[in-house]
Image (cartoon, rainbow, N blue to C red):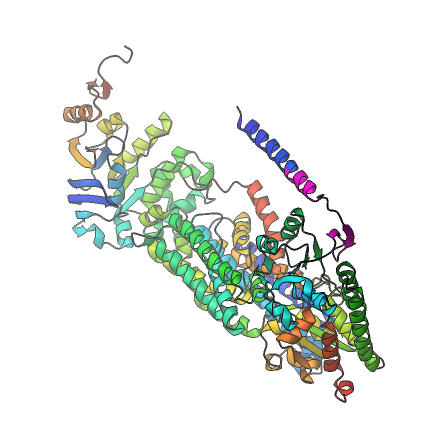
Amino acid sequence: MIEAIDLSVKIGKKQILKNLNFVIHEREKIAIIGPNGAGKTTLMRVLGGMLPYEGKLIINGKEMSEYRRQDLAKLISYVPQIFYTPYTFTVEEFVKMGKYISIRNWWNAEGIDRYLDEVGILNLKARYVNTISGGELQKVLIARALAQNPRIIMLDEPTSHLDPKAVFELNRTIINLEKTVISVVHDINAAFNLYSKIMIMANGQLYGIFSGKSKEFVDAISRIYQIEYEILDGKFIVPKGPYFQ
Amino acid sequence: MKPKFLILFSLLILLILNILFSISIGPVRIPFDSVTSTIFYYFMGDPYNRIYMLIIFYIRMPRVFLAVLIGAVLAISGLITQTIFRNPLGDPYLTGIASGAALGASIGFLISPFVVEPLAFAFAMLAVFITFIISRVDGEFSPEIMILAGIAVSFLFSALASYLIYLKEVNLRGVLFWLLGGLYGANWNDVFYLTIASLILFPLILYFVPEFDLMLMGDEQAKSMGVDTKRVKLITLLSSSIVTSFAVSMVGIIGFIGLVSPHIGRKIIGESHRFLLPASILIGANLLLASDTIARSNPGGEIPVGIITSFVGAPLLIYLLIRRRFFDRGN
Amino acid sequence: MKWSNVLAIIIVALVFLSIGYYAGQLNNHTIQAPQKIVVTDDLGRNVTIYLPIKRVVSMDPSNTQMMYAIGAGNLLVADTSYDWWPAQAKSLPKVEMDNGTASVEEVVSYNPNLVLATTIQSTQIIDQLESLGIPVLVLEPNNISGIYRDMYLLGNITGHKTGAINEVNYMKSYIGNITSKIANLPRLRVLYMLWPDPIYTAGNNTFINNIITTAGGINVAANLTGPWPIINNETVLQDNPQVILVDNDTGISNISYFKNNPVWENISAVQNNRVYIFNQTESNWMNEPGPLTIYAVRMVAQFLYPQVFNET
């Protein structure tokens, strides 16, 4: 469980996050959405333990800043947004790195096939990470996060820049994870349909937390982006009115 | 045996052959059977050619082993810098060691030839510490800032050294010869102390082999996987800086070995540090030993070894640049 | 416009600029003057000199010494802070030197009609002075007969021909006196040490090599290439020099530097205590080709054959 009380972050003299209050429960699927510059990535970094903060941030009953790096890695894994890596490691080696916190000589780790299988890339096992596609690499990174066996997985815009098939597969993988998932999402339809809770960020503040597939979420989105959205067939969020004037 | 172990084993065999070869050649021609017989008789207590014995045991052997050690030191420091900074152009002098040592040596020549080496070491370490202090962001070294800080500190220390030389107070000849670098005066004492330093500091670096591969992914990913990046950076950069400063204070500034050896290593054994680290060490040792043997065997008098390493290293680097665009690293 | 075109235009412009620049430099060299002679200096350059010579700036102690030795010292209007002989040379106005290189402005401020220099001066400075119409003679003999040649040259252009002839004859007889004494003695192997680590020494075509040879020695580094080669310590061990001459600049103060070294202690010169460390004046004699070179020859001969010279 993650509990934030008056969570604020300053970088230099600039206030990036202001007094955030929220609770994230076990196994929840959280989407974070908001305009560029709203503080989404900063929030992810602070939840990943990469940034100093003010206020309280309690992970499983213990203050974030009191965690040692190794212990935190057992709880939270952060999947960055990377679509290319130049290093000549095999997918197998890459995923084994996730085992580092349990086996320091991670290359001796066994039984990583199940993680590859879970994200559907067992066939890529022997390939080099610099030769696979962006979507495949995102899945490899998720498999690596799974190998870390954390309670919480955080993803930074996992599906942007990918083709529709890769998006579909990746979203299916993410939503079926038996973990708490916190994901920065730009696609409001994906947020609406796939996630149980959606946190809307604006100007470094938490605008609100909404349930998935709720009318309130669509209203909030309309106000934030200043575009009138409506729900079509209970599934699609589309702007009201025609595109062409 | 796995192929990667086979490569490491071959590099080791190559080093041993290189050592034997280097001991048996030099400006004074000693036939190979005389080399072996001199060594044999020396240990057996039988009569031997005294000049040959002196050349082999007191001139060539210390120099050969010093070349091996310094090659290893430069290669390991070069690799650490490239990995931690995630910069393919990283070399052991990135943190200002070269300019610091040059300033220390200049001050040393001002005082007495006997304090040149200690002062070169002290000022190299001073430059490193200044670079380290500047590059601390939120209590951790920032690679981007460290590269710039290293450049700034290098320029500052070089300027101070140049100013001392300009003021004519410094024995110009001494400083110039020192800056050129070389293993001329190698003796068993040097070999002994550098061995001790390496035995203490190499394990501190080798201990972090599991972390290095993860560090390649960048600080945030490494942290997320549970690596205490702060500790890895501090201990490995400090260890490699100390041992490099020590080596530089002995033989001056020898370029290219630290830059090129890890690149050759990656080419032949891949990215995993558990193979790359020992491979780079062996390649660095082989390269510097071969370069120094060429440098000292020139019949028209010795050539500064830095000239040879640049001649060997620069084309190798260009070749690697053409073969593999390793600049598109990062995200 | 494409970037490549812009680049091409810039390159072409630069090429024309540089052609103009160098052409201009060539023009500057052909300034006319009424009374002139052309002489060849030690770099083989043809230098046009305007007579009579009235004001001379010397940028090297060896050149200063030659001027005084032939009796032309009164023509000097400035020399350097390195000058030490004769005593008058020390009181002349000084051209300040940065790392051995003089400032052109300062040289010009003395309004010389001849500048004497060695190759320590950068070629830019020589070119700059010549472009201002000031002839520069580079006098850097690399053997003793070269000193005689340069003294005759200076004597001819300054009008001190007799002084030059007298000085050369004096030097010749002084040196002849030494060489006749050692003519039948066995020649000794000599290592000259300019710097100890690495061991820089004097090669075949150097002034120092000529002094050693004249004084009865065999320079062990004579077969190495370049004027100031590095000699490997194993070569030294093999050549086993009987005498070692150590320059004052090395900072070596006594023979213990060699005695406590497993390699050096095996060398004949060290075992027989025949290591000679020059004091500053002696180093100057060795390094400044000029009238004082005779003392360098005498000094080395004395080091090599004390039995001959101690009687006098």
- Please name the residue shown 16% across and 30% down the image: A211
In the picture, residue B286 is in which quadrant? bottom right
* Residue numbers of the magenta segment: C21-50
Q: Residue sitting at 70 percent across and 52 percent down?
A: C135
For this orientation, the residue located farthest to the right is C184
Height in image: A188 above or below C269? above
Within the image, what quadrant is residue B42 found in?
bottom right
- Residue C288 at x, y percent in the picture: 69, 68
Across and down, in percent, residue B140 comes to 32, 53
Q: In the picture provided, is C182 more to the left or to the right than A223?
A: right
Q: Residue at x 82, y 81 (%)?
A: C182
Which quadrant of the figure contains the C terminus of chain C? bottom right
Image height of B258 relative to A193, above or below: below
Q: Nearer the viewer, residue B233 or C301?
A: C301
Find the residue positioned furthest to the top: A245
Residue B277 lies, with reference to residue C82, above or below; the image says above
Does residue B31 show up?
no
Foreground of the two, B194 or C207? C207
Q: Foreground residue, B11 or C10? A: C10
Q: How many marks?
A: 0
Q: Residue at x 63, y 50 (%)?
A: C124
Picture quadrant of residue A243: top left
Residue A83 is at least partly visible in this image: yes
User: Residue A147 placed where, x, y %?
Assistant: 33, 46
Queried whether the magenta region covers residue C41, the answer comes back as: yes
**Above or below: residue C162 compared with residue B309:** below
Is residue A125 covered in magenta? no
Q: Nearer the viewer, residue B17 or B77?
A: B77
Residue C291 drawn at (x, y percent): 73, 71
Left-right relation of A93 to A38:
right
